[in-house]
Image (tube, grey):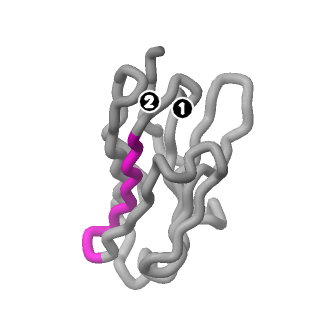
Amino acid sequence: VRLVESGGGLVQAGASLRLSCVASGMITSVFNPNDWGWYRQTPGKQRELVASVAGPRSTSYTDSVEGRFTISRDNARKRIYLQMDNLRPEDTAVYYCNTLKQDLPWGQGTQVTVSG
């Protein structure tokens, strides 16, 4: 199984981005029962969980992104999405997806850079 993230970029504050993650090589019967999350990491800091989706629609967010980010999943396509609106410079990081158990090899991530 390989996690492949995409959709990052360089944007100005207030802009939006939509990140996508595909669990390549994972069959749907394994993908579907898992709870998934989007994580981010900046240099010198630990990777942090910013959004999670449990089951089809139960979502949770860290306080700093609540109301601005929306996580969703497409089980048929084995994809996890993160819609990020009203981006701020402090959202600058490399973004990763993984299960909430973090039991899959980490992908390469996708860089999000927000200029002020």
Q: Is residue 79 inside the magenta stretch?
A: yes
Q: Which amino acid type is shown beneath numbered disc 2?
A: Val
Residue 36 percent across, percent down from the top left: 52, 65
Note whether 28 is above or below 109 in the view shown. below
Q: Residues within 10 Å of mark 2 (few under 14, many from 20)?
A: many
Residue 58 relative to residue 44: left or right: left
Evaluate if marks 2 and 1 touch, with contact meaning CB atoms under 8 Å apart: yes
Which residue is at 66% across, 50% downward? 63
Answer with the quarter of the image where residue 79 lies: bottom left
Given residues 86 and 29, the one toward you in this image is: 86
Note whether 9 is above or below 19 in the view shown. above
- Residue where numbered disc 1 is placed: 91
Q: What stretch is highlighted in magenta?
A: 76-85
Residue 13 relative to residue 49: left or right: left
Q: How crowded is mark 1: few (under 14 residues within 10 Å), some or many (20 or more)?
A: many
Q: Main secondary structure of the magenta part?
A: strand
Residue 37 percent across, percent down from the top left: 54, 59
> Callout 1: helix, strand or loop?
helix
- Residue where numbered disc 2 is placed: 112
> Callout 2: helix, strand or loop?
strand
Of the image marks 2 and 1, the number of the one nearer the N terminus: 1
Which residue is at 55% across, 56% downward? 51
Residue 114 visible: yes
Q: Which of marks 2 and 1 is in front?
A: 1
Residue 46 percent across, percent down from the top left: 73, 37
Q: Residue furthest left?
A: 77
Which residue is at 43% across, 75% downward? 31
Given residues 51 and 98, the one toward you in this image is: 51
Q: Which amino acid type is shown beneath numbered disc 1?
A: Asp
The alpha-carbon separation of the residues under discs 2 and 1 comes to: 7 Å
Q: Is residue 43 inside the magenta stretch?
A: no
Residue 1 percent across, percent down from the top left: 43, 61
